[in-house]
C-alpha cells in the first residue's frame, strides 16, 4: 500500500480471526516501534508481547473494572502492551515526554501492522495498577496503552459494531476545523 493509503484506511478492529500473526510480521511491527523518534533519542518505550492464547485470556481478565468493556481482546491472537520508563525520557514545558515518545512508537507499530493487513485497536480503558501487577512490571514502568493485533474477521459482531458507534471511531473532523495558519483563528 502507499503510505497515505495505509494511514487513511487504518481503522480500529474489534473482531479478530484466530489466524496467528507470523513472527516475521511481528518483528517488523516491533522494529517500527524501535525506530520511532523520541525525546533526545532516549527510547523510553518498552513492549510486552502476549502471544499465548491462555495468557491473552488471562490478560483480558486483568485489565481492571474499566477494562471489562474491552473484553473482545480475548479473541485476538496477539496483544502488545506499550510501556515506558520515564527515567529514559524527559520533561519539557511541564509535559512528560515518555507519553509522547511511546505514543509515536505505538502508532508506527499500528500503521506497520495495517500495512500487512493486521488490525489493531488502541486501548486506553484499563486500570494501570491492575495491569502492572498482572504483568509483573517494575514500579517505575508506566503502562501507556495496549492493543490487540490480528487479522480482521470478515464479519463484525454486534458487540464490535456497538463499540465502534460508542467510541465514534469513524468520525473525522474536517481540516478547516483543525488547522490554523500563522496564528490561532486564522483560516487558510
Image (cartoon, rainbow, N blue to C red):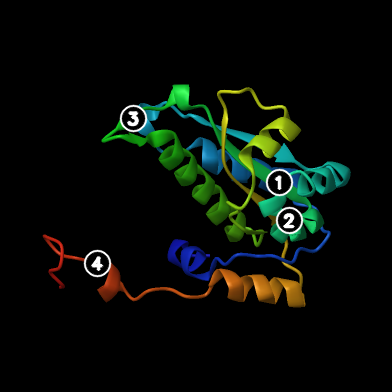
In three-dimensional space, the C-alpha distance between marks 4 and 3, rounded to whole angstroms, equals: 26 Å
Count of numbered circles in the view = 4
Q: Residues within 10 Å of mark 3 (few under 14, many from 20)?
A: few
In three-dimensional space, the C-alpha distance between marks 4 and 1, rounded to whole angstroms, equals: 37 Å
Ranked by sequence position, the earlier of labels 3 and 1 is: 1
Of the two numbered discs 4 and 3 in the rendering, the one whose residue sits closer to the viewer = 3
Ranked by sequence position, the earlier of labels 4 and 2 is: 2
Left or right position of 79 against 185: right
Residue 64's spot in the image, x, y percent?
Answer: 71, 46
* Residue 121, above or below 58: below
**Disc 4 on helix, strand or loop?**
loop
Residue under label 2, please give it.
68
* Residue 44, above or below 163: above
**Disc 3 on helix, strand or loop?**
strand
Residue under label 3, please give it.
91
In three-dimensional space, the C-alpha distance between marks 2 and 3, rounded to whole angstroms, equals: 33 Å
* Residue 120, above or below 141: below
Q: Are marks 1 and 2 in contact (CB under 8 Å)?
A: yes
**Disc 2 on helix, strand or loop?**
helix
**Disc 1 on helix, strand or loop?**
loop
Q: Are marks 2 and 3 in contact (CB under 8 Å)?
A: no
In three-dimensional space, the C-alpha distance between marks 1 and 2, rounded to whole angstroms, equals: 7 Å
Residue 165 seen by the camera: yes
Left or right position of 27 against 76: left
Relative depth, front residue between 8 and 91: 91
Dot label at residue 179: 4
Q: Which residue is rendered at x = 67% and y = 33% of the image?
A: 132
Residue under label 1, please give it.
64
Residue 155 seen by the camera: no
Ranked by sequence position, the earlier of labels 4 and 3 is: 3
Amino acid at each position: 500500500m502507499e503510505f497515505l493509503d495505509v494511514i487513511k484506511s487504518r481503522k480500529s478492529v474489534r473482531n479478530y480471526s484466530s489466524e496467528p500473526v507470523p513472527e516475521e510480521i511481528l518483528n517488523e511491527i516491533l522494529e517500527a516501534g524501535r525506530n520511532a523518534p523520541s525525546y533526545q533519542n532516549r527510547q523510553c518505550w518498552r513492549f510486552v508481547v502476549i502471544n499465548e492464547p491462555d495468557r491473552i485470556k488471562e490478560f483480558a481478565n486483568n485489565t481492571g473494572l474499566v477494562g471489562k468493556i474491552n473484553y473482545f481482546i480475548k479473541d485476538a491472537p496477539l496483544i502488545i502492551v506499550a510501556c515506558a520508563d520515564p527515567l529514559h525520557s524527559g520533561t519539557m514545558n511541564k509535559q512528560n515526554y515518555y507519553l509522547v515518545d511511546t505514543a509515536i512508537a505505538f502508532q508506527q507499530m499500528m500503521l506497520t501492522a495495517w500495512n500487512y493487513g493486521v488490525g489493531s485497536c488502541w486501548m486506553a480503558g484499563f486500570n494501570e495498577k491492575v495491569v502492572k501487577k498482572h504483568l509483573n512490571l517494575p514500579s517505575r514502568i508506566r503502562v501507556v496503552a495496549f492493543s490487540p493485533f490480528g487479522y480482521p474477521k470478515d464479519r463484525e459482531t454486534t458487540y464490535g459494531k456497538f463499540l465502534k458507534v460508542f467510541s465514534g471511531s469513524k468520525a473525522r473532523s474536517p481540516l478547516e476545523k483543525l488547522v490554523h495558519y500563522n496564528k490561532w483563528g486564522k483560516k487558510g
